[in-house]
Amino acid sequence: MPDVGYSLNRSYQPPVKRYADLDGPDFYPTPEWATRALIDNEKFVGEIWECACGDGAISETLLQSGHQVYSSDLYDRGYGKTNLDFLLSSRKAKNIITNPPYNSAEQFLHHALELAEQKVALLLRLAFLESAKRCRSIFQITPPTRVWVFSERITFYPNGVRTGGSGTTAYAWFVWDKATSTNTELNWFPPGYKS
């Protein structure tokens, strides 16, 4: 039987998107292992702002690793400071780590680069590297310092729902390190984080 959730607003949507749209735009809780891969391979010193914290998935992993975390979100999902529009905020932070709403990832990046003193890390589709517009507006001006590609696919499930299978989209952590002015490094997380 076909799943009517695949068609929202008369267009094809990824499987998880059908649930996310019911509670607000682009809510994809991040699996713990995806955050663990980042913090095992990238050092963050000082406070971290998780500015699209959702239900606290990334924040909780960071806290469990001993980091000081400030969590906020535009929507109230029961975690962090709510009704805080990151794109309108002037709050500074040492570091910003988030899985931004994909439809405003570019705006999140530009604003995060203004507010973060040390590093910005965004969990984005690997296809974010594509696009002539992003090449001109981001990569030719402020290319990422490191791109950490997942060798295992991430599957984003709605909160409380778990199904089998693997994701169909490739993701990476894009890191901008203000203390480093080298060319972009391309790295891969070794297999094993997902298990």
Image (cartoon, rainbow, N blue to C red):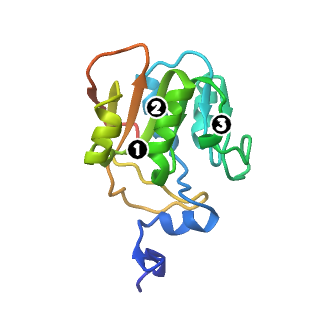
Q: Nearer the viewer, residue 173 or 139?
A: 139
Name the spot of residue 153 as percent of width and height, x first: 34, 48
| Amino acid tagged 3 | Ser
Nearer to us of marks 2 and 3 is: 3
Name the spot of residue 137 as percent of width and height, x first: 35, 39
Nearer to us of marks 3 and 1 is: 3
Q: Quadrant of residue 124?
A: top left
| Amino acid tagged 2 | Ala
Dot label at residue 121: 2
Name the spot of residue 159 as percent of width and height, x first: 60, 57
77 sits to left or right of 124: right
Which of pointers 3 and 1 lies earlier in the amino acid sequence? 3
Residue 151 visible in image = no
Dot label at residue 124: 1
Q: How far, Cα to Cα, is label 2 from label 3?
A: 18 Å
Q: Quadrant of residue 61?
A: top right
